[in-house]
Image (tube, helix red, strand yellow):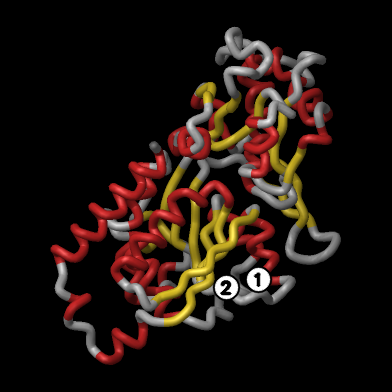
Amino acid sequence: MKKFVLLILAAVVIISSCGNSNKNNNLTEEESDILKGELVIFHAGSLSYPVKAVCDSFRIRYPEVKILTEAAGSKDCARKISDLGKPCDIMLSSDYKVIDDLLIPEWADWNIKFATNEMAIVYTAKSRYANKINKDNWYDILLKKDVVFGRSDPESDPCGVRAVLTMKLAQEYYKVRGLSEKMMAKDKNYIRPKETDLIALLESNAVDYIFLYRSVAEQHQLNYLLLPDEINLKKEELSDLYATVSVETTGKKPGEKILETGAPMIYGLTIPKSAKNFNLAVAFLTFFLEPAGGMAIMEANGQPSVVPSVSSHYDKIPDELKKFAKHENR
């Protein structure tokens, strides 16, 4: 049912786009060259559903474009560019700070924030204590000896960082001494590289609960428990509270560490300096960031748009994409 809805939405987006422009029928020779070729997109696992829908929509309008997508934890995506030199035209990260911390300025010049999300506790009808869990007792249930929970690796995936931040915020919110340490020490065998790897564990009943984004739970039609705003990393107005907790992870160089401070979750995107199809990447992102284009698909998948938002790299953003960002001093 979810895939059917996405296909209908994609069709509506294309019809709307074509209705507003004759560009597809009146391409200049230069535009025709831009909208051909191969586009490589690295993206966070939590973006798999909406990215596929956006790509399908884009290809309907521009059938001569071949799009190759590769999902991974956002940090792993960044390291494929910086450490492995893998070809990539667009990177879509579930945390804009991954681009800032791991790619700018050596491998990318700019970053556009485009969507938000929130953390949730995700489960199935077969999960132990599924009929008893609520926003007041979820941490007690996850710590039970007969319950197993999973989370993603903070070293490779922002969702893993956010799971730990959620645990630390929960300790302060519920006033339970040592709560985060107990949770982080439990079920380490069920830590996976990216958040979407956890879904297979949950659906096979290998684990009872997972820390996951609300959007991914909705996309996969899984049960989820909403957490208090003081914990879920959703509200921009709670930025100061979120910033009271942090996680230390590996930086750009061996032995280097980054202190990742709690913050509202905001997704970011960029075109790496090494992109082989820069013009095609700009054309795709123009479609992706349009309110009636990719952002409509993002919204339908539980990931609200934050376009346009302030960028500290505004002056380096390609001119065609500047309308999707704001200068921080204006």
- Compared across the picture, whether 289 is left or right of 134 comes to left
Q: Residue at x 61, y 40 (%)?
A: 262
Front-lying residue, 246 or 204 = 204
Residue 216 visible within the image:
yes
The residue lying furthest to the bottom in this view is 29
- Tell me residue 219's x, y (percent): 47, 38
- Compared across the picture, whether 159 is left or right of 258 comes to left
The residue lying furthest to the top in this view is 132
**Could you say whether the residue bearing mark 1 is in a helix, strand or loop?**
helix
Residue 227 visible within the image:
no
Q: On the rendered image, what quadrant is the C terminus found in?
A: bottom left
Residue type beneath disc 2: Cys
- Tell me residue 212's x, y (percent): 59, 35
Residue density around tag 2, few if under 14, some if 14–19, many if 20 or more, within 10 Å: many
- Tell me residue 261's x, y (percent): 64, 43
Residues marked 1 and 2 touching at CB (< 8 Å): yes
Q: Residue 24, which numbered label?
A: none
Residue type beneath disc 1: Ile
Q: Which residue is label 2 attached to?
A: 88
Front-lying residue, 215 or 82 = 215
Q: In this picture, is 271 found above or below 175?
A: below
Q: How many marks?
A: 2
Mark before the other along the chain sequence, 1 or 2: 1
Q: Residue at x 35, y 80 (%)?
A: 35
**Could you say whether the residue bearing mark 2 is in a helix, strand or loop?**
loop
- Tell me residue 122's x, y (percent): 58, 27
Q: Which residue is label 1 attached to?
A: 81
Q: Residue at x 75, y 46 (%)?
A: 248
Q: Residue at x 72, y 48 (%)?
A: 193
Marks 1 and 2 sit apart, C-alpha to C-alpha, by 7 Å
Q: Quadrant of residue 87?
A: bottom right
